[in-house]
Each structure stands twice: as C-alpha cells, then as structure tokens.
Image (cartoon, rainbow, N blue to C red):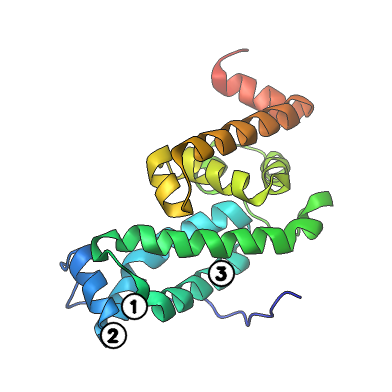
Amino acid sequence: MATQRSHVPLALVVCQDHRTVSDEDLGRSLMAGEPWAQTETWERFAPMVLMTARRVLGSKAEAEDITQEVFYRVFLKAKTLREPDKLRSFIYSVAMHALGSELRRNKRRSWLHLDDDREPLGDLGCEMESRDLLRKFHSFLTRLPARESLVFVLKRMEAMTVEEIAVIMETSVSTVKRLLARATDRLARSIDVDSGLRAFFAQERGDT
C-alpha cells in the first residue's frame, strides 16, 4: 500500500557561507553530520532532483513531494557514502530508487489516462506547441517499464552519458544501452501510431 505524503511546497534554503565548498568536502561534512552540510546539500542539489522528477512524473506537486522524500533518505543514509567525491551520483542514485518506486505505484493510474495536474516535460515543453501532444507523449513515457523510463529521461532529457547512468542506477553500461534501446523502440512505435505526434516529430526531423 502506498504511503501517504503531506504536500509541502518546495522551498530552497539559501546558504551563504559554504557555496564554494567542493562536492567532496561537502560529502565529508555530510557524513560527519555537520548541520550546515544538510542545508548546502539541499541548496546545491534539490533543483537538479526536482527537475528530473518533474520530467519523469509530469506533475509539479508529485515532483516536489518526491524531492523532499529523496533528501530525507539522503540525510538518513549519508554515513553510508563511501566516496565523498561521488556525492552527486549518490544523490541521483537515491532519487532513481525513489522515482522507480513512484512510477510503479502510479502505473495503474497513468496507464489509461493522465491526471489533470500532469505538465509538459522540461525543455521538451518549450519545443512542442500543443499541450495535448505533450500529454500524449508523457502518457507513452509513463507506460514504459520504470527502469526504461528512467534511462530514457536521464539520457535524452538530462543529457547524461550511459556511463553516468550506469553508476547512478547501479548497473552495467550494456544494461543501460539495452534499456535505452527498448525505451526508444517502444516510444517510436507508440508515436508512429499517433498521427499528431508522428507529424510533429517528422517536422522536427525535417521530413516534411
């Protein structure tokens, strides 16, 4: 049974004294339990997690809630961080686990339709003129298996390398490539049977 989260608006905490600290030193301080480190970790990485969550989930409210949950987990697990210089990857890894669980919980709801609060996906929303097309595209994206959806977002929307994705998702590069290929193929077939999306992507490629 899915746990209930209270909706609390996301508000970034401004940290003025530690912005020049390296990720590695920040990671060490977080592991040591220094109070300022939590504030700086939130300030530095929350926007990154929030943007990825909005692209994956398509909902601002859900993205805000999951971002808070991610950092709650990060702070609880901070002492398990083995390589302080890999703090960013550590946070992304926690986020991927949380988003994967959220996608699976939402699977039944998003299989047939999108909720009213679903939104365009990041930069892709600026490129597509029709909100209906955005909703259709996101509906196809959420129908993918969770790992395929996450890999597609990280590669195509976050512009990560397959090596970076492999580290974050704790898997091999070859597995990431297979997941990406499957996701791309499934989306291509879904787009091909939708005249509106097919026409849009054909125009983007210069086929018309």
In the picture of the structure, the residue carrying the numbered disc 2 is 33
For label 3, the residue is 66
Per the image, label 3 sits on a secondary structure element best described as helix
Find disc 1 in the rendering and name its residue: 79
Instruction: Compare marks 2 and 1 and give the one earlier in the sequence.
Output: 2
Nearer mark to the viewer, of 2 and 1:
1
Q: Position of residue 69 (x, y in %)?
A: 53, 75
Q: Earlier in the sequence, mark 2 or mark 3?
A: 2
Q: Position of residue 119 (x, y in %)?
A: 63, 54
Instruction: Answer whether labels 2 and 1 touch (C-beta < 8 Å).
Output: yes
The residue drawn where x is 43% and y is 53% is 168
Distance CA(mark 2)–CA(mark 3)? 23 Å
Q: Position of residue 100 (x, y in %)?
A: 61, 58
Residue kind at label 3, given as amino acid type:
Ile
Tag 1: residue type?
A: Lys
Q: Residues within 10 Å of mark 1 (few under 14, many from 20)?
A: some
